[in-house]
DNA sequence: CTCGCTCTGTTCACTAGGCGACAGTTGCGG
DNA sequence: CCGCAACTGTCGCCTAGTGAACAGAGCGAG
């Protein structure tokens, strides 16, 4: 199973009625990508909004020196590039596929047409963006205010909850490389490893190859609460998390980022 | 003049037709706040969406130890608390007024009603949120990847552009205390001061009491470009920045944050 | 004019976190 | 079942950034 790392709670497709969904799919153009294939570059031509139909997409910002920042790994039902629909903005991220991936591309006119016919789509897009904004502000707060071990713990907690679909407090596996986490937090891998070690020493997590095991979500949650500098605001309950539970890629994932 | 610090390019009211705007104002309840008055706390009851009619509002997160993170200072036409309209989420920030301020509060049912009658409002809200998300992602990238002097320079640059309404490259004044900038970037005031000093040594800015003077926006821009680690993506042109240009508060601003 | 408050400039000892390097480990592909 | 490539663990050195503290400077109020 590939965990959609820091996947946002709500995507465009979530809570969309069947007719609107069908209309949306009919309005765009399908694209297929294979594992690791590059889709677009930051600043490139405006391709329109993209919706993930199956598979996953890494959203990242690649620096001039070749290093990369990871923003999110989006799964089915999630959209990106909305910004290109407004004010003729350029794409803001580099994107590449994780596993075999199918995408739906909607140009500005595609979108205008289908959104006009189905106002529900605008609603869903708004809802998704409001939730994403909320998530991002929380992350921003964390990064500015909390010591890194706490930021890391919160991140793992969020992902653990996501994997269990918000459910119980039992043990959870999170499939992710330490390098990806480091790219996400913007710290060096070496440092991340040390920090993970601290959490492991506390018995909150176990680390293994490309995987992090959380033996008890509740314990992790308690520890985070104790070390949180400000009041915790529960993110809105994801009314329906539409990630297909089955694994989309098997085994090891090929390098999605070009060598540096 | 009070600069709306890091104000987002597009607010709800921007690009809204007169009839929709009137309907919106008619649909909500007006509230008046005086300088420094506290509006709401993070995690408190869901009050609905709020639109700034006049004056400014500081959005922040106050930590348990009394320290605060600044997220934005919103001006006329900008909205917040949208998240409380969806999934019954709680407020995510503490908010207080800067100068005499008039607000419009829309409960969930207020919003549903007026949004139903004027779909244009949903559009505008979506547009605003998409742009904010973009801004925030950029900020997140900066904070994770760039050395602090560059982050600071970019921040000043953005504000300088905002003050001149995106116009020329001449000299600009930015009215802001160093403490606010520090709270925004999440660094100590002492360190911020040192960093500002570096920019001043380069001749890019002059600092004075509660004010930063940028002698040449172009020069600042060039320096930022040179020191940027990744490609620059221009934020979408703010089609109409609706901030009232006249100063809403005169002279010194009272403490908006409770003593600590 | 002068008091008092807020804001700025600066110092110093201390800690978090970065960077490069390298050795050990896992697991896929052949 | 072997070899290679992708990962992980760890060390040592170095800079960025902290927190507390305090003196000076700007500005509003009486």
Image: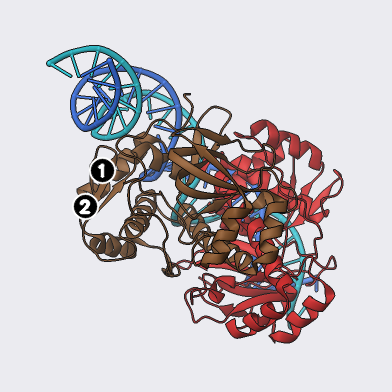
Chain colours: A red, B brown, C cyan, D blue
**Residue B254 locus on image (x, y percent):** 38, 31
Nearer the observer, B162 or A225: B162
Helix, strand or loop at disc 2? loop
Give the residue at mark 2.
B202
Q: With C23 as the anchor, is A29 left or right in this view?
A: right
Label 2 to label 1: alpha-carbon separation: 9 Å
Helix, strand or loop at disc 1? helix
Task: Give the answer, above or below, for where A119 lies relative to A126.
Answer: below
Nearer the observer, D23 or B123: B123
Q: Residue at x 54, y 59 (%)?
A: B12
Label 2, residues with CA under 10 Å away: few <14, some 14-19, many ≥20: few
Give the residue at mark 1.
B197
Are marks 2 and 1 in one subunit?
yes
Given the image, what chain letter belongs to the residue carrying mark 2?
B
- Residue A52: image quadrant is bottom right
Q: Is residue A203 visible?
A: no
């Amino acid at each position: 199973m590939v965990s959609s790392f820091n996947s946002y709670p709500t995507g465009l497709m979530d809570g969309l009625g069947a007719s609107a969904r069908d209309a949306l799919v009919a309005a765009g153009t399908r694209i297929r990508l294979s594992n690791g294939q590059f889709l677009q570059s930051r600043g490139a031509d405006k391709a329109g909004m993209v919706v993930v139909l199956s598979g996953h997409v890494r959203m990242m910002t690649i620096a001039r020196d070749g290093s990369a920042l990871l923003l999110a790994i989006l799964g089915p039902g999630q959209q990106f590039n909305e910004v290109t629909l407004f004010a003729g903005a350029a794409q803001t991220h580099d994107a590449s596929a994780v596993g075999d991936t199918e995408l739906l591309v909607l140009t500005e006119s595609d979108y205008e047409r289908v959104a006009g016919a189905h106002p529900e789509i605008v609603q869903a897009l708004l809802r998704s963006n409001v939730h994403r904004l909320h998530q991002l502000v929380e992350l921003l707060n964390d990064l500015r205010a909390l010591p890194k071990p706490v930021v890391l713990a919160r991140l793992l907690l969020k992902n653990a909850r996501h994997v269990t679909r918000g459910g119980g407090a039992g043990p959870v596996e999170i499939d992710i490389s330490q390098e990806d986490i480091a790219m996400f937090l913007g710290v060096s891998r070496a440092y991340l490893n040390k920090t993970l070690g601290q959490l492991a020493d506390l018995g909150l997590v176990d680390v293994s190859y490309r995987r992090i095991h959380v033996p008890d979500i509740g314990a992790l949650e308690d520890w985070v609460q104790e070390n949180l500098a400000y009041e915790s605001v529960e993110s809105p309950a994801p009314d329906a998390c539409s990630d297909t539970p089955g694994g989309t890629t098997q085994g090891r994932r090929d390098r999605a980022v070009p060598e540096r």
